[in-house]
Image (cartoon, rainbow, N blue to C red):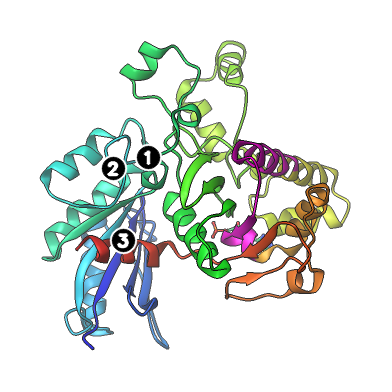
C-alpha cells in the first residue's frame, strides 16, 4: 500500500512545532521544534526514529527556520517525497464564524485568517507567519484546521453572551471555544471505545491550557473557553473565569493599561499567579510539603472543575461518560481521584488500581458498577489535524 503523510505545523510567535504523520496508520514518522526564533539563542531539534539532531545558533525568522527543517528532512530523513507527503496541515486557533471544518488554504482563506487576528491576537498572527513561509517553500496543498471549528455548531444559548446585542454583533463577540480539535478527537475516540454514539459526554482537556466540553451524540453543546482561550478552567498561567469588572477595577485603581491586564490574565495568573509555578506537578509537590498557597491553588483548580462537570451534566440532562485528556488529565491520578470522589453523589465509582496505572493507551478507570463511565484517552492533535487534512483532500 502506498504511504501518504501529512506534515503538521503549529506555528507560534517565536516557534515552529512540526510532526510528519501517517494519518491512515495513525503513526508519527518524525517530529521537531524550532524555538526562540529571532533571538541569538535559537534552537532546533529534529527527531527521526533513533536519530536526534540539535542545532543551536541564531535563526532570524520563520522562513529561515522552516528552510532549516526542510534541509534536515533531506539530510537526516525521512525524505519527504519518498515518505509520500500529500499535504501540510496547519493548526489555527481562531476560525471565527467562518470555519466549521478544515479548509484548503488559498488566498481567500489566508486573508480570512488575517481578518480574524483581532479575535485571536495571541495566535493567528503567529500562525500566519508559518502558513506564509510553508506555502512558499512546499508545493503541496496546505490545509488549515481550526481549534474553533468543533464548536461552530454550539446551540445559540451557549454561544451567546448576555451582552448588548448590537455591540456583540458588530464586534463578533460570542463563544467560539478552543481546543476543539482535541475535544472532537477525544470524544470520538471515547464513543469508539465505548462502542456507541448516543452518548452524553464530558471531555476534560487538562494541560497547561485547560478546557471542558459537553458533547451529545458527537455534537458539542457547550464548552468552557469563550471568545478567546482565556475563559473557563484554572490554567497554567490563565485566570479562567473571572468577573470582567476586575478589568475596570485594575484599570481605574491600579492604573494598568489594557495590554498589561491582558498579559496579567493570560500569562501571569492561573496556577502561576497563585503559586509562582505553572506546572501542576510542582504545585502538587509543594502542596504535599504543606505549602498553604499551593494547597489553596489546588482547591481552586478542583472547585472550578467540579462546577463545570455539575453544570454540564445539568445542561445535557444526564451524563454517560467523563473522559480525561492532555498532560494533567492523562497523568495526574490524584486529581482524577479527587474529582471522581466528589462526584460519588452522581454514582461515579473509580477503580483506584486502574486509575493509578500509567499508560499511553485509551483506558477505562471506573468500576463496572459505576453509573458513569470514566475514561482516560490520550489526545493527539497532530494526528487529528493530519486526518482532517487527509479527509478534506
Ligand atoms: P500539555 O499542555 O497537555 O502538554 O500538559 C502540560 C501540563 O500537564 C504540565 O504543565 C503539567 O502541569 C501537567 N502534567 C503533566 N504530567 C503531569 C503529572 N504526572 N501530574 C500532574 N500534572 C502533570
In the rendered image, which residue does mark 1 sit on?
152
- The disc label shown at residue 213, or none: none
Asked whether disc 1 touches disc 3, contact meaning CB atoms under 8 Å apart, the reply is no
**Nearest to the observer: residue 272 or residue 195:** 195
Residue 234 lies, in percent from the top left, at: 64, 41
Res 166 quadrant in image: top left
Residue drawn at point x = 61 percent, y = 36 percent: 315
Asked if the residue at label 1 sits under 8 Å from ligand 1, the reply is: no
Q: Is residue 61 above or below residue 159?
A: below
Residue 345 lies, in percent from the top left, at: 83, 47
Query: Residue extending furthest right?
Result: 290
Q: Is residue 85 above or below residue 337?
A: below
Q: Residues within 10 Å of mark 1 (few under 14, many from 20)?
A: many
In the rendered image, which residue does mark 2 sit on?
99
Bounds of the magenta span? 303-330
Residue drawn at point x = 56 percent, y = 45 percent: 214
Q: Quadrant of the C terminus?
A: bottom left
Residue 326 located within the stretch drawn in magenta: yes
Residue 226 lies, in percent from the top left, at: 48, 34
Q: Secondary structure at mark 3?
A: helix
**Nearest to the observer: residue 33 or residue 86:** 86
Q: Main secondary structure of the magenta part?
A: helix
Locate ligand 1 by image quadrant: bottom right
Q: Residues within 10 Å of mark 2 (few under 14, many from 20)?
A: many
Describe residue 263's horizontal placement relative to residue 48 as left or right.
right
In the rendered image, which residue does mark 3 sit on?
388
| Real-space Cα separation, disc 2 to disc 1, in angstroms | 8 Å
Residue 265 lies, in percent from the top left, at: 56, 33
| Real-space Cα separation, disc 1 to disc 3, in angstroms | 16 Å
Residue drawn at point x = 42 percent, y = 54 percent: 181
Describe residue 219's horizontal placement relative to residue 146 as left or right.
right
Amino acid at each position: 500500500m502506498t504511504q501518504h503523510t501529512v506534515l503538521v505545523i503549529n506555528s507560534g510567535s517565536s516557534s515552529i512545532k512540526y510532526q510528519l504523520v501517517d494519518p491512515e496508520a495513525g503513526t508519527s514518522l518524525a517530529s521537531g521544534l524550532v524555538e526562540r526564533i529571532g533571538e541569538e539563542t535559537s534552537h532546533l531539534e529534529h527527531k527521526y526514529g533513533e536519530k536526534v539532531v540539535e542545532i543551536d545558533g541564531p535563526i532570524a525568522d520563520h522562513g529561515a527556520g522552516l528552510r532549516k527543517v526542510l534541509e534536515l528532512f533531506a539530510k537526516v530523513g525521512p525524505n519527504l517525497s519518498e515518505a509520500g507527503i500529500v499535504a501540510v496541515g496547519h493548526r489555527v486557533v481562531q476560525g471565527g464564524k467562518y470555519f466549521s471544518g478544515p479548509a484548503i488554504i488559498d488566498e481567500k482563506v489566508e486573508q480570512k485568517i488575517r481578518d480574524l487576528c483581532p479575535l485571536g491576537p495571541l495566535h493567528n498572527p503567529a500562525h500566519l507567519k508559518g502558513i506564509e513561509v510553508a506555502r512558499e517553500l512546499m508545493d503541496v496543498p496546505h490545509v488549515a484546521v481550526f481549534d474553533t471549528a468543533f464548536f461552530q455548531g454550539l446551540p445559540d444559548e451557549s454561544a451567546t453572551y448576555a451582552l448588548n446585542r448590537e455591540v456583540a454583533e458588530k464586534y463578533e463577540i460570542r463563544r467560539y471555544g478552543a481546543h476543539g480539535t482535541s475535544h472532537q478527537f477525544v470524544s470520538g475516540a471515547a464513543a469508539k471505545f465505548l462502542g456507541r454514539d448516543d452518548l452524553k459526554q464530558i471531555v476534560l482537556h487538562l494541560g497547561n491550557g485547560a478546557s471542558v466540553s459537553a458533547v451529545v451524540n458527537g455534537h458539542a453543546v457547550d464548552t468552557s473557553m469563550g471568545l478567546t482561550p482565556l475563559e473557563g478552567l484554572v490554567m497554567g498561567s490563565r485566570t479562567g473565569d473571572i468577573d470582567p469588572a476586575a478589568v475596570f477595577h485594575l484599570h481605574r485603581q491600579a492604573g494598568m493599561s489594557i495590554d498589561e491586564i491582558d498579559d496579567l490574565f493570560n500569562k501571569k495568573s492561573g496556577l502561576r499567579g497563585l503559586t509562582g509555578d505553572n506546572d501542576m506537578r510542582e504545585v502538587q509537590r509543594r502542596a504535599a510539603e504543606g505549602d498553604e498557597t499551593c494547597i489553596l491553588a489546588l482547591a481552586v483548580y478542583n472547585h472550578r472543575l467540579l462546577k463545570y462537570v455539575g453544570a454540564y451534566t445539568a445542561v445535557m440532562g444526564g451524563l454517560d461518560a467523563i473522559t480525561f485528556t492532555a498532560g494533567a488529565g492523562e497523568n495526574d491520578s490524584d486529581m482524577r481521584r479527587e474529582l471522581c470522589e466528589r462526584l460519588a453523589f452522581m454514582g461515579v465509582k473509580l477503580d483506584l488500581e486502574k486509575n493509578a496505572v500509567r499508560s499511553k493507551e485509551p483506558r477505562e478507570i471506573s468500576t463496572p458498577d459505576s453509573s458513569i463511565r470514566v475514561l482516560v484517552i490520550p489526545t493527539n492533535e497532530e494526528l487529528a489535524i493530519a486526518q482532517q487534512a487527509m479527509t478534506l483532500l
